[in-house]
């Protein structure tokens, strides 16, 4: 006698690789996605981060099978899936606008994918129940979507996507409508489920903190292309372009000129009025550059030194255990400096700014700065 299949697998399935290979999508003559390639490991969480309109949703829709590309391929475990209709791709998607069925209750929405796959009876009920518990909506099971808040609808959409046990999960800003506490709960819950089920996951987000904390790697998109695909730490510490640099974290941009390069060390004269040394990062002597310095890589001091520059102090704001200082350098360049909160000389006494000894600022050609385009 054949044993009944369990409602859900007891053993986590091996994750799938997901390869996006040179994908291009056009809407009419406009290019929404322009030659994007991403090789995603089994069970990996990749965050897509980028400004509105850069092509994030379009990329997800092609992977899910709702939009057809003009060029390039999508492969799962090395096999092209472009010929498959959406419901045969084993891809779960949570849409940016939830897209719940308005005439169906919460229960019916969550059960939809299971029924569409021909499942019936107690197994479906149990699975739906589990999913609703997970998103803390058990008490709302008979409601219609219009009787729910935006955040609750988002949770139903997540439960619906996970109910069919996909091997690839696509999440389009799934937590945007949730308040802070619930958002954190859901981030942890999604990460736990994703690990347990070995789900290869793409998460679209506008929130860099979310990308940094949830993702194994981040793809930063700009105008339909991926500017950098790397670990969160690498993206923060070694941004490849000024765009990536400006999109992740807060940064200070200090213009200057490379006076000399000896070995791998560049001597840069900052417009603010100091000369600093730092790794040359392939930039030649004589170049006009922009130095990108994180707020925690700057210190204020009461006395001038060879490599400090004068500043006009502004506001100082306590932020948890830190103090955030605003200041202005020569030429009006606005600066943000972050330091641990401690008792120190009156802020107005500290009229000089310098790099911390361990600062590793990024150096970019000035010509790549949008203001010079
Ligand atoms: N169905 C469509 N028809 C025509 N143009 C579209 C269509 N969908 C998206 N676009 C355009 O394609 C580009 C990329 O859109 P997409 O929705 O992928 O951006 P996004 O990165 O998800 O933005 P957001 O962060 O605002 O959600 C935009 O310029 C958008 O106007
Ligand atoms: Mg979008």
Image (cartoon, rainbow, N blue to C red):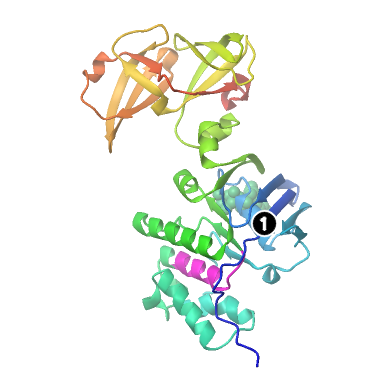
Residue at (59%, 27%) from the top-left corner? 370
Residue at (51%, 32%) from the top-left corner? 237
Q: Is residue 105 visible?
A: no
The N terminus sits in image quarter: bottom right
Q: Main secondary structure of the magenta part?
A: helix
Magenta span contains residue 207: no
In this rendering, would 326 be left or right of 54?
left
Q: Is residue 255 above or below residue 30?
A: above
x and y percentages locating residue 121 in the rendered image = 54, 89
x and y percentages locating residue 274 in the rendered image = 45, 9
The C terminus sits in image quarter: top right
> Element under label 1?
loop
In this rendering, would 319 be left or right of 86?
left
Mark 1 CB lies closer than 8 A to ligand 1: no
Q: Is residue 366 above or below residue 322?
A: above
* Residue topped by disc 1: 17
Residue at (28%, 36%) from the top-left corner? 321
Magenta span contains residue 166: yes
Q: Nearer the viewer, residue 18 or 255?
A: 18
In this rendering, would 339 be left or right of 2?
left
Q: Nearer the viewer, residue 157 or 123?
A: 123
Q: Which residues are magenta?
A: 153-167
Q: Is residue 131 above or below residue 220?
A: below
Residue at (51%, 87%) from the top-left corner? 122
């Amino acid at each position: 006698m054949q044993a009944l299949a369990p409602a859900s697998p007891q053993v986590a399935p091996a994750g799938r690789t997901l390869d996006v290979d040179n994908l291009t999508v056009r809407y009419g003559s406009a290019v929404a996605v322009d030659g994007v390639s991403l090789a995603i490991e089994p069970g990996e969480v990749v965050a897509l981060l980028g400004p509105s309109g850069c092509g994030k949703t379009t990329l997800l829709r092609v992977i899910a099978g709702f939009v057809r590309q003009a060029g390039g391929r999508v492969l799962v475990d090395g096999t092209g899936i472009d010929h498959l209709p959406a419901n045969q791709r084993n891809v779960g998607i949570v849409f940016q606008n939830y897209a719940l069925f308005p005439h169906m209750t919460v229960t019916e929405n969550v059960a939809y994918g299971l029924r569409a796959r021909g499942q019936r009876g107690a197994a479906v009920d149990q699975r739906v129940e589990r999913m609703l518990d997970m998103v803390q909506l058990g008490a709302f099971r008979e409601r219609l979507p219009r009787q729910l808040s935006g955040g609750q609808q988002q949770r139903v959409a997540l439960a619906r996507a996970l109910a069919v046990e996909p091997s690839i999960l696509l999440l389009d800003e799934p937590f945007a409508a949730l308040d802070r506490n619930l958002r954190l709960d859901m981030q942890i819950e999604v990460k736990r489920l994703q690990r347990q089920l070995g789900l290869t996951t793409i998460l679209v987000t506008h929130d860099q903190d979310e990308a940094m904390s949830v993702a194994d790697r981040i793809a930063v998109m700009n105008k339909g292309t991926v500017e950098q695909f790397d670990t969160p730490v690498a993206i923060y510490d070694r941004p490849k372009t000024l765009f990536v640099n400006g999109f992740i974290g807060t940064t200070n941009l200090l213009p200057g000129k490379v006076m000399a390069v000896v070995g791998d060390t560049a001597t840069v004269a900052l417009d603010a009025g100091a000369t600093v040394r730092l790794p040359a990062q392939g930039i030649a002597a004589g170049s006009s550059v922009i130095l990108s310095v994180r707020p925690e890589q700057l210190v204020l001091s009461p006395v001038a030194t060879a490599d400090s520059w004068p500043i006009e102090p502004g506001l100082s704001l306590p932020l948890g255990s830190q103090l955030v200082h605003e200041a202005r350098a020569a030429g009006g360049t606005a600066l943000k400096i972050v330091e641990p909160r401690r008792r120190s000389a009156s802020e107005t006494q500290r009229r000089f700014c310098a790099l911390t000894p361990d600062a590793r600022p990024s150096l970019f050609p000035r010509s790549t700065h949008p203001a010079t385009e």
